[in-house]
Image (spheres, rainbow, N blue to C red):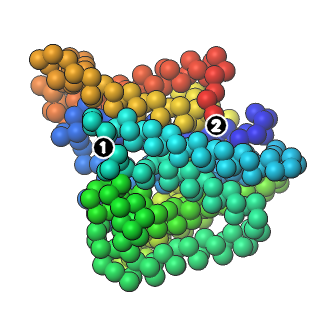
Amino acid sequence: MTEASERLQALDVFRGVTIAAMILVSTPGNWESVFPWLEHAPWNGWTPTDLVFPFLLFAMGAAVPFALARRRGVPRGVRHHVIRRAVTLFALGLLLNAIESPPPLHLATFRIPGVLQRIALVYLAVSWITERLSTRAQIGVTVAALLGYWISLASAPLSAEANFGAVIDRHVFGSHLLYRLWDPEGLLSTVPAIATALFGVFAGDWLKEPGVPHRAWWLWAAGFAATLVALAWHRVLPINKSLWTSSYALFTAGAAAQLLAFCYWIVDVNKWRSWSLPFFAFGRNPLAAYFLSVGLDSVLARWRVAGAGSLKAVVYRAAFASWLRPCCGEQTASFGYAIGYVVLWAIVLVEMHRRRIFIGI
């Protein structure tokens, strides 16, 4: 983002809501007891959890028109910034993979793709596209990406191991995948993820355009129309997060546009902001919030306590399961831990915000 005066508060709040949701679904107290809507859809279809990652890419795309504007007057400023940030994000993703891998670390099967790695590739592509191409050309690239990916999927069965993207990943990465034969953050499925972020660019450009009346309602209507088209498309190309199908990219971008429009109407148009500080704090420090929270959760899950399992299990049983499980069940206790973990990081991020500590790359 650019200077504070040029920021869209709604975009920070939208991104903060997304980061908080990502932490919530990534850190239950007990992975064996999770509400269905807090898990990804088994294959085709979607749950609220399946919206989180594309919402983050959409938010990143929406920030691009603001984030790169102040560097356009500096020779090579945009290019150097984009490349440095993408490389750093990719390296942090590899580090997070190492933290999350059970010891000992096996380099022969160490996973290379991942969430931050996909964000890095999408950011690199979207930044290049928006700097080099007109808006009309960007729309053409988005349509071509969705249709081209649809055609590539039609050449093979829509299964995890047999789709064309899995074949490419096995040739490129070998055994360095999340699963033996495929990875949900593979190379080919990054193409429609780029389209997801480009939809965010279009939303950011729209909200950045001065003098447009009722822009929140127009954005919401566009998002609603996109979700309807995606649901119709679902009949021939299933909405599928693992494959990031074109219908999934369009559906989640439409839903993200509706939520961003609502945040814009609430936060920037009507100035109702008293409730938004925790989400604003998450949104101003998204990388720190995600990396540190997921990393700490992995450390807690592997920190062994003699005779009691992991440190996370000890905390979960003592602080949540001991009183929530008898009255409300194991799933509620697991969900309670996740909420408590989000609140903990909200306190940390709000304090960082008050001290003007922003960790960026």
Query: Are the residues at dot 2 and dot 1 in contact (C-beta closer than 8 Å)?
Result: no
Q: Residues within 10 Å of mark 1 (few under 14, many from 20)?
A: few
Which residue carries the number 2 mark? Answer: 361
Q: Say the numbered circle drawn on residue 208.
A: none
The answer to whether residue 272 is seen in the rendering is no
| Occupied quadrant, residue 311 | top left
Q: Amino acid at mark 1?
A: His
* Mark 2: few/some/many CA within 10 Å (<14, 14-19, 20+): few
Q: How many marks?
A: 2
Name the quadrant containing residue 199.
bottom right
Quick one: label 2 or label 1, which is nearer the N terminus? 1
Q: Amino acid at mark 2?
A: Ile
Q: Secondary structure at mark 2?
A: loop
Q: Choose between 236 and 212: the one closer to the eye.
A: 236
Q: Position of residue 6 (x, y in %)?
A: 78, 40
Q: Position of residue 302 (x, y in %)?
A: 26, 28
Q: Residue at x 42, y 22 (%)?
A: 344
The N terminus sits in image quarter: top right
Estimate the x, y position of residue 56 in percent, counting from the top left. Answer: 52, 48
- Which mark, residue 106? 1
Viewer-nearest of discs 2 and 1: 1
Where 277 sits versus 269, above or below? above
In the depicted view, which residue is nearer to us: 31 or 11? 31
**Spatial separation of the CA atoms under disc 2 and disc 1:** 29 Å
In this rendering, would 246 be left or right of 340? right
What secondary structure is marked by label 1?
loop
Left of 308 or right of it: where is 19? right
Residue 43 at what x, y percent from top left?
A: 28, 63
